[in-house]
Amino acid sequence: MSKYRAANGIQLTQGLFLEHGNQDAPYTLRDYDIEKNGKTYKSIAEIYRNSIDEYDAAMKIVESWAHWQKLLGLGWFVSGLETTQGYRFTGLVDWRLEMQMRDESRSKQQLQELAETGNVSASRYLNEMSRKGSTKAVGRPEKKPKQTKAGSQVTQLYSQFKK
C-alpha cells in the first residue's frame, strides 16, 4: 500500500500531515522539515517551492494529479488554517503567489544577464517593464467626457423655467 493511501485504499488528505495527528504521515505543513521521535517529516511547502510548476509539485508530493485535485478540493489546504499546535499554515494560495514571484524574478534575472551581454531586445524589454512600474502614463491620453459644472446646469434649468 502506498504511503499516500489509507489501509482501505482511499487517498489520504489530512492523513498526509503530522499536524492532523497522523504520526505515520510523510509530511508536515510547516515551511521546513521537522524531526520528531526519530522520524523526519518533509515540508510540503518546501517541496512545492522547489518544484518547476504545480504539476511537478503534485507528482513529487502525491504522485498523482487526481490525488492532487482531491487536495485542491479541501478549503483548508488551499486557503490555510491555524493548526492545533499553534502553527499557521498559509495554504496553497500563498505558495502559488510565491511561485509566481519566483518565476518573475528568475525571468528578470535572465533578462538582465542578456542585457549586460549587449542584447538590445532584453534591454528594451527591461526598460519597458520599469516604465510600467512608474506613475507616468505612456501613450495617448484618454479622452474624458465633457463635464458640465453644477452651476451651469442650475443656470440652464432656471432659464428654461423662466420661459
Image (cartoon, grey):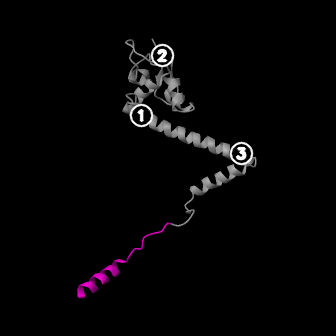
Q: Do the residues labelled 1 and 2 touch (CB within 8 Å)?
A: no
Q: Is mark 2 on a helix, strand or loop?
A: loop
Q: Do the residues labelled 3 and 2 touch (CB within 8 Å)?
A: no
Using residue 127 as the reference point, say whether residue 136 is left or right of it.
left
Residue hosting label 2:
37
Residue 133, above or below 106: below
x, y (%) of residue 75?
Answer: 37, 33
Q: Is mark 1 on a helix, strand or loop?
A: helix
Residue hosting label 1:
78
Residue hosting label 3:
114
In magenta segment, residue 161: yes
Using residue 59 as the reference point, say whether residue 79 is left or right of it.
left
Quadrant that contains the C terminus: bottom left
Instruction: Tell us which disc is closer to us: 3 or 2.
Output: 3
In magenta segment, residue 103: no
Give the magenta part as a residue range: 142-163
Q: Around disc 1, counting alpha carbons within 10 Å, would you say few (fewer than 14), some (14 to 19), or many (20 or more)? A: some
- Kindly give the residue lying farthest to the right in the view shown: 117
What type is the residue that disc 3 sits on?
Answer: Leu
Instruction: Tell us which disc is closer to us: 1 or 2.
Output: 1
Real-space CA distance between mark 1 and mark 2, rounded to the nearest whole angstrom:
29 Å
Nearest the eye: 95 or 37: 95
Q: Around disc 3, counting alpha carbons within 10 Å, would you say few (fewer than 14), some (14 to 19), or many (20 or more)? A: some
Q: What element carries label 3?
A: helix
What type is the residue that disc 2 sits on?
Answer: Asn
x, y (%) of residue 68?
Answer: 45, 27
Real-space CA distance between mark 1 and mark 3, rounded to the nearest whole angstrom:
37 Å
Q: Is residue 105 visible?
A: yes
x, y (%) of residue 145?
Answer: 42, 70
Q: Residue 60 carries which label?
A: none
What type is the residue that disc 1 sits on?
Answer: Val
x, y (%) of residue 2?
Answer: 46, 14
